[in-house]
Image (tube, rainbow, N blue to C red):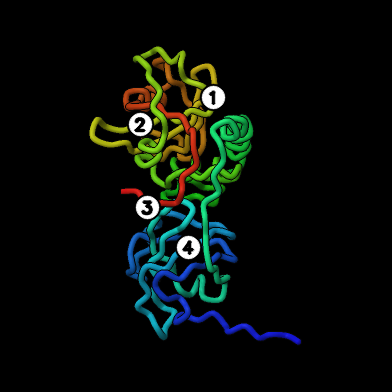
Amino acid sequence: MFLLRKPITIKSMTPNSLWELKVDVNGYKNKDFTNKELVTQACKGRSFEVIENKYGSTNSGRVKVRLLEDGYICWLNIKDIESNLKSKQTWKPSLISKAEIQSQLPKILKWIERASHNKNKYLWGGTLGPDFDCSGLIQTAFALKGIWLPRDSYQQEQFCEKINFKPNDYEEVMPGDLLFFGSKAKCTHVGIYKAKGLYWHSSGPINGRNGIGIDQLQPTNENPISSFYQSKLRSIGRVVCCHDGRTLP
């Protein structure tokens, strides 16, 4: 005997309900359906909680959600998800130990190297690939090994264990440590340390490489991109735990 499941409709997506994506989707900045500003992407298999849904009978709007793995809040197009969801009753984070995280770092760096060989460009909000933004590249590389980090670079900086360093002295920096760049007021960019003074990052077309590339912590005058980012280096952090899905400021 077959049991017929009720079809998932817009009305099913009530506040606090939990869902799993069956497809990759884009996450947008606000509820304005005409605004195409991307802030993140969510791959098939990710889960979310509905925060707000004011479109009870039309799929031409957006629903406000919290992506559960990183606590990130964004808006999804209803037409993209309505028939591509699986209902969930509960959700809990996947947490692994510091030792397990450290064991995955060589694989994470290898994945980023492979990603750099794909044709790619910098994409604000990109996490699905081949086009990434800076923090999207880092988050995805770790997530593929079961290690969830916060979404944005400034959140990743706050999340990491800080590593002490002095200008031009990076002896304490280990492969897989995260490098944070920006102003004194705020972090705006992130990369990941490779080894021997080199790091991977996805940088933009202005003062960057418009995609994934390698730069140097101690650049020569012949490397203006490395020199630009070296002048913006503000902190270095180490990933020692998994994000538990809480929404961060």
Kindly report the distance in space between the C-alpha atoms of the residues bearing marks 2 and 1: 17 Å
Quadrant housing the N terminus: bottom right
* Total count of labels: 4
Disc 4/disc 1 C-alpha distance (Å): 32 Å
Q: Residue furthest left?
A: 185
- Nearer the observer, disc 4 or disc 1? 4
Q: Marks 4 and 1: CB-CB under 8 Å? A: no
- Would you name the residue on which mark 1 appears? 175
Where is mark 3, residue-wise? 247
Measured as percent of width and height from the top left, residue 11 is found at 44, 82
Inter-mark Cα distance, 2 to 3:
23 Å
* Residue at left offset 23%, top offset 34%: 185
- Secondary structure under tag 2 reads strand
Q: Which mark is residue 181?
A: 2
Cα–Cα gap, marks 4 and 2: 30 Å
Secondary element at image label 3: loop
Residue 113 seen anywhere in this rendered image of the structure:
no
- Which of marks 3 and 2 precedes in the sequence? 2
